[in-house]
Image: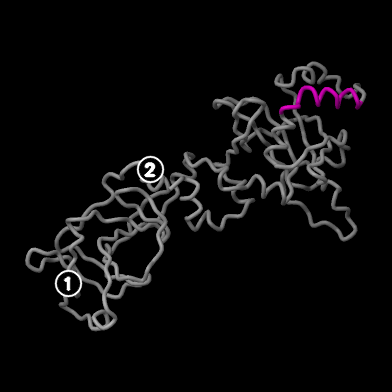
Amino acid sequence: MKPIDILAALPKWATAKASDILASPAWAMPCRLGERQCVMRLDAAHPAETLDLSVKLEGEDHILGIPDSPAFPELHVIWPSRGDVPEPILLALVEKDCGQLLQLIENAARRQLKIAGLAPASAVAEDCDPPAPASADQEHDTPDSGAKTAFAQIYADGEPLFSFTLTLSDALETAFGQLRNLDTGNPVIRDTPLAAEAEYATFPISAADFASLTTGDALLLPEIGTQPPRLIVEGRLAIAENGVTEWKDNSLPRVCATESLPVTVGTVLDAAEHAPEGLLVQPKENAPLNLVRSGKTVAQGRLDRVGAQFAFIVE
């Protein structure tokens, strides 16, 4: 399985909202700046001053803030006196200096971007608090001064290139807040604890035989010693000798360890890349075991032998 598929199968991320994904320190959106492969992260310092532009993303109004940066050389030269520069000239410099940034935002949002002009001071978002509810007579295309603001930094080869600010909307959060934009190598993701269950055998059994199980009965387990066990993670994924697959309970009886095993997302991601070492360990003789069906422990027992064959002895 691919890392994104593993995340999508786990409960925490399967139900994650776009805003939660966007708020994760592991959020790192791949993007391109011209021909250069880059990454956008929301870890930029809040700039003291920005050149604030009113922009439209397919009709939706936003405020784009551009701080002073050598990455925008002509704006950088006139930055101290930018208030004296006529708006048409200032906007022309933005189009020239920041064209690749504008294209990057357009591609990331998957919406056409147009500059409407300089943003009035009253429309500039001051912080990233959640937006206040709109009044009934408020125009939908009016920027909300309380809108959440993203403080984005663009990186290439691990080095910061420049930053910018952009007001967010539900639509932009949805576009940006996708699982594919999480860096699965980030410790925030890799160190997330998960519960895993060691499964040693699974087998069909008739309803009559299952119903008649009693203390002292033995269920032969030819799998033990001949086939490696597997780990069932969070009831969603199976780690086996050949990697990681999605797992669904087929309601067959399963012989499992009595104790849950602590693993992490990193453990699962690594097991998807190469055969796991030290995870898939056979149980020792007399080890306590559970007989599980449909997520419930229906019998407890131990591992013993019947002749030369391993067996689950019901206790």
Q: Residues within 10 Å of mark 2 (few under 14, many from 20)?
A: some
N-terminal of the pair, mark 2 or mark 1, is 2
Q: Nearer the viewer, residue 208 or 162?
A: 208
Q: How is the image coloured?
A: one colour
Quarter of the figure that contains the C terminus: bottom left
Q: Quadrant of residue 125?
A: top right
Q: Where's residue 34, x and y in %? A: 67, 26
Q: Which residues are magenta?
A: 87-100
Please report the residue visible at 78 percent of the width from the left and 36 percent of the height from the top.
64
Spatial CA distance of label 2 from label 1 is 35 Å
| Amino acid bearing label 1 | Ile
Please report the residue visible at 16 percent of the width from the left and 67 percent of the height from the top.
311
Q: Quadrant of residue 258?
A: bottom left
Q: Where's residue 247, x and y in %? A: 40, 59
Q: Tell whether 262 sits left or right of 139.
A: left
**Numbered badge on residue 108:** none
Q: Tell whether 216 sits left or right of 92.
A: left
Q: Is residue 310 above or below residue 272?
A: below
Judging by the rendered image, the residue that carries numbered circle 1 is 313
Please report the residue visible at 16 percent of the width from the left and 77 percent of the height from the top.
217
Q: Where's residue 77, x and y in %? A: 79, 16
Judging by the rendered image, the residue that carries numbered circle 2 is 270
| Amino acid bearing label 2 | Asp
Is disc 2 placed on a helix, strand or loop?
helix
Q: Where's residue 154, x and y in %? A: 64, 30
Q: Is residue 17 above or below residue 248?
A: above
